[in-house]
Amino acid sequence: MRDHDRAEDLTQETFIKALDALRTHDPECDSGGWIRRIGYNAAIDYVRIKRLPTVPLFNTAEASPEPPTYQVPAAPVAGRTASSEANKSAVSQALNQALRHLPRDQRRCIKLRFFEKRTNHEVAQILGMPLGGR
């Protein structure tokens, strides 16, 4: 959660939900996995509600001025001729511009995984992070 207070709130919420659902839990099932799933769902619900910031790649009328938007060329249209290399270059420039606005660790992760084609395991090792970001 990257926020100690919010993580504590979600932990408390998890145990309250588990207590409320205890009567429906099968004691033959793995209790640890059951409660972890409740916690995971609580965290996912929080992320959905909070709507973490994203960076759009297209300029749209609905886009707010912050964060910055980037103009990406449209897909080729039948009857129009466009240089494939020029189109790729424009998309690459827009992606690089968007990447520059990400925090350093996120930028490194994306570059290692998608530009250098590293596996998730390799990215985790290089960045000194546990696999899965926990």
Image: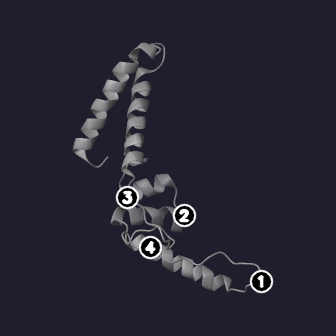
Amino acid at pointer 1:
Gly
Image spot of residue 79 (x, y percent): 77, 83
Q: From mark 2 to mark 4, how far is it between C-alphas? A: 26 Å
Q: From mark 3 to mark 2, how far is it between C-alphas? A: 15 Å
Q: Is residue 7 left or right of residue 25?
A: left
First along the sequence among labels 4 and 3: 4
Q: Secondary structure at mark 4?
A: loop
First along the sequence among labels 1 and 3: 1
First along the sequence among labels 3 and 2: 2
Q: Which residue is mark 1?
A: 79
Numbered circle sitting on residue 117: 2
Which of pointers 4 and 3 indicates the residue nearer the eye?
Answer: 4
Q: Is residue 121 visible?
A: yes
Within-10-Å neighbours for mark 3: few <14, some 14–19, many 20+: few
First along the sequence among labels 2 and 4: 4
Image spot of residue 67 (x, y percent): 37, 69
Q: From mark 1 to mark 2, how far is it between C-alphas? A: 35 Å
Which of pointers 2 and 4 indicates the residue nearer the eye?
Answer: 4
Say which residue appears at 44% left-offset and 27% top-offset: 33
First along the sequence among labels 4 and 1: 4
Amino acid at pointer 3:
Leu
Which quadrant is the C terminus positioned in? top left
Q: Which residue is mark 4?
A: 69
Q: Is residue 116 visible?
A: no
